[in-house]
Amino acid sequence: MQRRLMRALPCLGALAISGALAAAAPPEPIDAPASARAARSAGAETAWSFTLPRAAITSAGVYDLQGRLLRTLWRAETLPAGAQRRSWDGRDDQGQAVALTDVEFRLIHHRMAYVWEGVIGNSSAAAGGPSAHRSFLPPTSIAPVGSRIHYAVGYNEGQPGLHGFASGAPQVDIRALPSTDPFVGYAMLASDGVRMYWANTGGMSHSSFIGAHDLATSARAVFVAGAPVCLNFRPDGKTCYPDQTYASVIDLHTEASDGPTGLAVQRRGRLLAVAHGGQNRIRLFDKTTGALVRDMAVRLQPKALNQLAMSPAGDLWVISGRTVLRYTDLDGEPRVATTISMLERPLALGTAEAGDDSVWVADGGASQQLKRFDREGQAAQVIGVAGGYGNDPAVAGDKLFFGANRDQERTAVGVTADGSLWVVDTQNNRMLRFPAGALAGNRSDERIAYLPASYAATVDHGNPRRVFANFLEFDVDGNAPLQAGASWKLVRNWLAGLPASLTDERTANSGFGGFASVETLANGRTYGMLSARGRQTLVELPASGPLRVVKPLAAPMPRMTAKVLYENGDLGYSLTGPGRQTVLRLPLKGFDAAGDPVWSSEPTALASVPTSAGSPWFRGAFTGLLPPRFPVSASGRVVFLDQSVQGNEGFHLGAAATGADDWLWQASPTGALDGKGSFQTKRLDGSITYGGNAVWTHGRHIVYGYHGEFYKDLKTGRVGQANQFMHFDEGGLFIGQFGQPSTREAPALDAGLSGNAFSPTLVRDGSRLYLYHNDESAHGGVHRWRIDGWDDIADLRGRGAMGSTIELR
């Protein structure tokens, strides 16, 4: 029996319950009939009938007269138009006889369809498949060879680590060189036009080494002086898996700290140079045989990439601290011929295949520019606005952003045969081309964009054109097909303006960095929620200028969840005490003189539920970047989601009426993923590590995500990621399920496939209802699903005595 929350809850102490909340509480229950009559009705067959005006997808359930769901009768059955008749055996979801006299039957019917429209943030010509650019990490190295530009992406989770494109068709990825071994991280490239040399800095293996491919045949090159290496032995410990067997590599190291930090090769000479920043040495090898020629002692950066570049004449450019050195006479007595010291923080070097011996330097720190110097060290050319995005988040073609903090700055530079320059604009997740002769004021004339593994995506409900991935903001037209430059564009990068107090190891435009939520509030200003250094902070995203800190939020008390910024500006959280879990809100009261939000100091209890076995209260499971959400539906249903794959073999989605202290309904039962809203747990699937993530409501609609890391398809035995979204009605009846798992034979070709999609957002944009979510690089962008028919769902209902025939209307 539901009771109104007009008292202090036992786990909370005294709480203020608003008058609006009290008024919204459900009425007291209707007096129950005589127990003898109820006993006679228990377990009786009850017939019920209905007429569908059209063929439709249907779900049905039995309720008591206070609206509690007793039994889900079926989920997502397609039925024809016309009169239908069914019966109910009088038992609830637990198989127990229902001891009531009167019940209500409800049936929902619809023609809902879920349409994957593509992704935002990937400029590739194809929406997916092998010709679309994508990788787990941002590009790490660029090596032009004639009209082909090759690039490497480091560790790529079993997908190709070596990519490329034709200079005339940059939006088409060409993967000509085999490179799918997850034990290898293809971090740096260098080519003499005959071979493509690559540096493995360690994938799933800690070993590092140098390998090569023959460009004419795409076969692995053989070094006469090389050595074989096995990166992954079979269980017998003696034989190697073929895919992890390398017959001939050079410069082999077994400790990650000894790995390469630079790679360069003479085009006409015989030398291959490998830098080891952790050892402050450069090793010179015979590029054909692999024999070591000499070691050079040079001060280097211990954690870096692309510290070397070879000039057309065979001289070696080297980053040494804050200077760049040119070494000449490498085959005789190497010596420094040029020193360039007018730099902030040199990050990467690039030289042309032919022509003069000048060098391009990507200069980080306060510069964020590309600088060209002639062979004598004289400044010749500068590209990019000084300081990059430090004072202005607006994205432009003449600005660069290599990193948010000193230890994470990375980029790569490649010079093509015609003198054009390709550079990795790392923290905008782009590769930009600047035409030959470009200067500081010149804009890039071509760009390749895609998002690496990103776990943060959200949408501003107050202005759904604003779509966010990590700290990047896209302007998106919700009424047009997704197409780079036409319906979406990157407009702001909020990362550069972060104060030091909001930066940590996750501060990047990939991974877990970024906004958990962004909302434009009633004052017309936009606010975002960030987490850094273990603390939540509210920030403003102003109309101009960098991000502004509004206030840090108090750390949660024990048994309290982190706070969520809801669409209306309220802050919400839950508190779990002995036997109960309570959802609370701090209502938005208004704005102070500075225009910043002001919240009530007294929390309002929305609902409280018993933490009984098998019920869907939040148990503290991993939820991704978003803290656990407890949204409210149109008719005041407070929604709970248990994301855990262990500890609950009952229901995983439920709701309580606003102001109530008991469950109104429970749904999404434990079971194999079946397309009908079941929740797969570790009892069924020993390989799964985590399951659900965030739940959202819009009107009567409830959608939650089930990313299912390492879930197993119980029919095929394949293991991957589930990437499912479960759609329910606010009365607890199932509507539909959508998403594309990664357990198919050719997952890269599947529309809608994503990895670890645990940051979904449900948002209405005009007349359309969308679900946006992040991606772990399967398609390299923020996904958008359109839910067609969302506003055309209908109900049939009928009440009557158990054991009679009830007609639904």
Image (cartoon, rainbow, N blue to C red):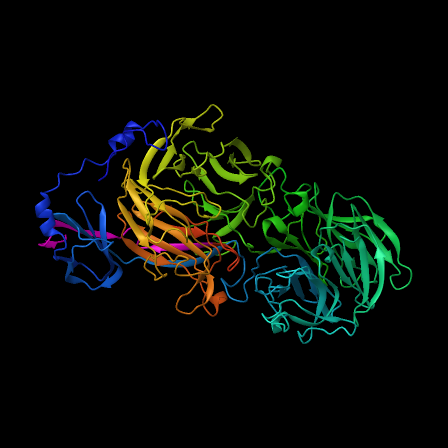
Q: In the displayed structure, would residue 405 be above or below residue 482?
A: above
* Prevailing secondary structure of the magenta residues: strand
The residue depicted at 28 percent of the width and 50 percent of the height is 732
State left or right for residue 752 relative to residue 389: left
The answer to whether residue 380 shows anywhere in this view is: yes
State left or right for residue 342 relative to residue 3: right
Pick the residue in front: 28 or 395. 28
Q: Quadrant of residue 404?
A: top right
State left or right for residue 77 relative to residue 408: left
Is 797 in the magenta?
Answer: yes
Pick the residue in front: 439 or 158. 158
Is 215 in the magenta?
Answer: no
Residue 412: horizontal and vertical position, in percent? 68, 55
Residue range of the region highlighted in magenta in the rendering: 783-809
Quarter of the figure with the N terminus: top left
Q: Quadrant of residue 431?
A: bottom right
Query: Tag count in the figure?
Result: 0
Q: In the displayed structure, would residue 634 be above or below residue 348?
A: above
Q: Quadrant of residue 149?
A: bottom right
Residue 705: horizontal and vertical position, in percent? 40, 52
Residue at the far right: name it: 333
Residue 41: horizontal and vertical position, in percent? 11, 51
State left or right for residue 770 relative to residue 430: left
Residue at the far top: name it: 593
Pick the residue in front: 406 or 394. 406
Residue 110: horizontal and vertical position, in percent? 26, 56
Q: In the displayed structure, would residue 304 be above or below residue 742?
A: above
Pick the residue in front: 316 or 94. 94
The answer to whether residue 214 shows anywhere in this view is: no
